[in-house]
Amino acid sequence: MLRSVRSRIALCGVTTAVLVGLTTSGATPPASATPLADAENLFRPQLVTVDTPTRADKALLQTLGLDLTEHAGHDYVEVVLHTLADVTTLTGAGLDFDVRIPDLLAREAENNQANAAYAAATATSPLPSGRDAYRTLEDYNADMAALADQHPDLVERFALPHPSLDGKQIYGVEIGKDVTGPDRGLPTFLMLGVHHAREWPSGEHAMEFAVDLVRNYGTDARITDLVDRSRVVVVPVVNVDGFAKSRTDGGLIDLREADRGGTATILGTPGSAYMRKNCRLVDGQDTPDGSCALAATSNGGYGAGVDLNRNYGGYWGGPGASDLFADPTYRGASAFSEPETQNIRELVSGRHVTTLITNHTFSNLVLRPNGAAPDLVPSSEGVPLGDPYDEAALKALGDAMAAQNGYTSQHAWELYDTTGSTEDWSYNATGGFGYTFEIGAHEFHPPFLEVVDEYLGAGEYAGKGNREAYLLALENAVDPTTHSVLTGKAPAGATLRLQKNFATPTWDGVIEDTLNTTMTVGPDGRYTWHVNPSTRPVVMDRQVETVSGEPVAQESWTGTTLPLQSTDHEFTVGQDADLFEVVLDWPTPDDMDLEVYRKGADGSLTQVGSSGNFVGEKERVLLQAPEQGTYVLRAINFASVTPTWTLTASLFDAETSTVPGLVENWTLTCERDGRVVERVPVVIDRGQQLRVHLNACGRR
Ligand code: 0X9
Ligand code: ZN
């Protein structure tokens, strides 16, 4: 989580930034680095929190050549200070900082011991694969190859069409009955991991699910049935370049002895254990293969790279994505500018992915579309985003999955606005359901035992966990009531093709999209094709709520709040209203956050909304159809000054209007010997089954 890192650290009492600088090679540094041997006695690498209340402070910090971690928020950036010279640089720039971890080596030693102790005590873990430590990229590739080798009829390993920027092949596995045979029109369930380099558990869970299905196929009736009725595609590591760097550097950390000796020289160079983005080293340009692996950049979210979860086409270029190359959420030079997102785009455009899960870490969330708040208005469309057309069904599955792992099920925008994320595009373009899982409570790559517990479930979720949540998602993927089914007669062996060309809205324009999918008619001359609906959700008629006139109730407060303190005001919602808006505004370029709580009869507070934008942006929480009762509005000052603010709570009635929708069709063609013999437009809704006989295709 970019935004909530600090509050989470404070809440959990866990500081998650354990980045220490390492060379990617791990080789002994050259002799010229020896002056550090003396420094080692004087100075231990530290993690500090640098105050950056203004954008100018952040910009200044980025020019100092220090080891910035991704652990950053509205008004601070966590930085690793490797040497006394780093301290001097920071103080010389006039930036304030607090020491968070005075001795990173000691801290690392603790984590290393936990991981080493777990691996030593565990011959095989309870995971499907029995693994007891994080995979490297080589491990993933070897595991996928082995799975396919050992189960050639059930698992096919494939390379995605585009190698990574650094020239690596990216692999996935497809699991299904007679997987290498012709495609017979089964629905696809897609599972993705590691869009963000440092989010290691997201790849582990994707890979474990693949192993789980394969190991239990043929013995577990539920899994056998699900695999027989689907094609499951797993791409555990989408961002191979970033992951390789993060895992290599993190692995060097894990190799370190607890004796505190001999490591200061390694710590003299920045590492990428907490890299977020991909390996785009120069904006909009290619660099030679292998150069990223050698580059000592991207130590965290800042610096070079594209945020792959802002580079997809769906509302690309809108809120919650940066247009600055050095920012953690840099959206890329254009929609789908990166080979990694092109891979997933082509995968999803070439099959009927009826449900997908894209795994991330951390915060224990199940997120569903939309990525951006319902009242935001993309200039490409001129009407508010509203809720997704399938909100009720998306919510039902999200809630059901969250009941297995104990995560919170919510709209993605309730976390913060994003545009250009995976399912913002996939759902909008195909209608296939898409979810983001944010795995784990505290850390981007926690001790491995947490990976085990999150997958299998622990405590009250024992025996459920993400494993059960994924199985529910797979059940949804094969459930014909959540997608569409075409059936009919057609010549045995003919190729059927469903195709659609359309313009996907970005934030202020469009991109051309093509869905092009095929299946082969079986020997009995009949076909059943599980497909996504013909009309995209983004062009379905849309219910939008527009505020009608003046607020029906409003109250304002002004005040000041000391740094790192908060101020509460109560507001009573005493009537039915459609929208409850709370706005916190202040004139200076400082950073404040806003939290909204519902007060229970016993005085307890339940958070119902929060807003933590970047410095200088005002904060706003919007609640739809608020329950009547008392709310606590909390203004929090994250800045190092004491700004004067205005807090306004307003209740609005809204007019619900319907933006009329379009009806789109698939073009179904029947092809024999590579020639199109019959062509039919097909309109089909979600949950519908339609019979289309392709009789003409059989005639000579
Ligand atoms: O910011 C992100 O990309 C995700 N969080 S993370 O900490 N893993 O980086 C959250 C994305 C949520 N938005 C959508 N899925 N649309
Ligand atoms: Zn992520």
Image (cartoon, grey):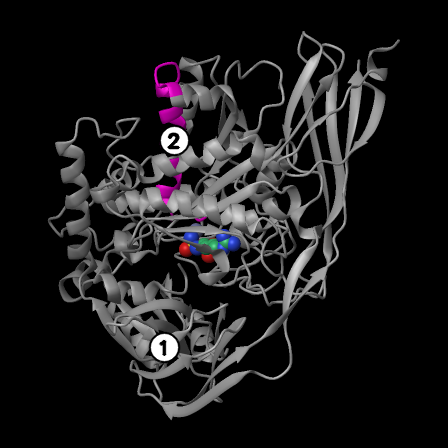
Q: Marks 1/2: CA distance?
A: 44 Å
- Confirm whether residue 301 shows in the render: yes
| 215 in the magenta segment | yes
What residue is drawn where x is 13% and y is 63%? Answer: 41
Look at the image and give the residue range highlighted in magenta: 196-221
Location of residue 591 (image quadrant):
bottom left
Q: Is residue 91 left or right of residue 505?
A: left
Task: Give coordinates of residue 42: x percent, y percent.
Answer: 15, 66
Residue 298 point in image, percent of width and height:
43, 55
Quickly name the residue at label 1: 630
Disc 1 marks which amino acid? Thr
In this rendering, which labeled residue sits more in front, label 1 or label 2? 1
Work out whether mark 1 precedes mark 2 in sequence or the reverse, and give the earlier one. 2
Q: Amino acid at mark 2?
A: Phe
Q: Residue furthest right?
A: 700
SS for dot 1? strand
In the figure, residue 430 lies in which quadrant? top right
